[in-house]
Image (cartoon, rainbow, N blue to C red):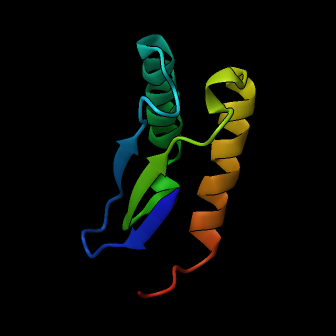
Amino acid sequence: MLYRKNNLGHPRLGLAIAKKCARRAVDRTRLKRIVRESFRLNRTRLRGWDIVVLCAPGAPTMPNHRLFATLAHAWETIEKQPCVES
């Protein structure tokens, strides 16, 4: 996950789920759907962030509840840690 502060006052989400990570279209679609739903549920916590979610090895085989838990931890990290300027 990559993130950077924006000056818009609302969060934006980008998805980069490559075929190299999730070969089957059904797996890529499932991952995108779960990320979007988790983002929608946590949108109020993420004010003013641009976030890009990348596919990690093993993500397509993870159960849904574990993906949601991993994303919840990531949202919490973004909320509490400032990003480093590049």
Left or right? Give the position of 2 relative to 65.
Answer: left
Taking the spot 66% from the left edge, 34% from the top edge, the residue there is 68
Image coords of residue 9 (percent x, y): 30, 68
Image coords of residue 47 (percent x, y): 41, 63
Residue that protrudes farthest toward the front in the picture: 20
Left or right? Give the position of 23 relative to 6.
Answer: right
Q: Is 66 drawn above or below residue 27 in the view shown? A: below
Left or right? Give the position of 31 relative to 76.
Answer: left
Can the viewer see residue 43 in this picture? Answer: no
Taking the spot 58% from the left edge, 67% from the top edge, the residue there is 79
Q: Is 34 drawn above or below residue 48 in the view shown? A: above
Can the viewer see residue 78 in this picture? Answer: yes
Q: Is 51 drawn above or below residue 43 in the view shown? A: below
Q: Is 15 drawn above or below residue 22 in the view shown? A: below
Taking the spot 41% from the left edge, 57% from the top edge, the residue there is 51
- The quadrant the C terminus occupies is bottom left
Return the residue nearer the eye: 32 or 41.
32
Return the residue nearer the eye: 45 or 1.
1
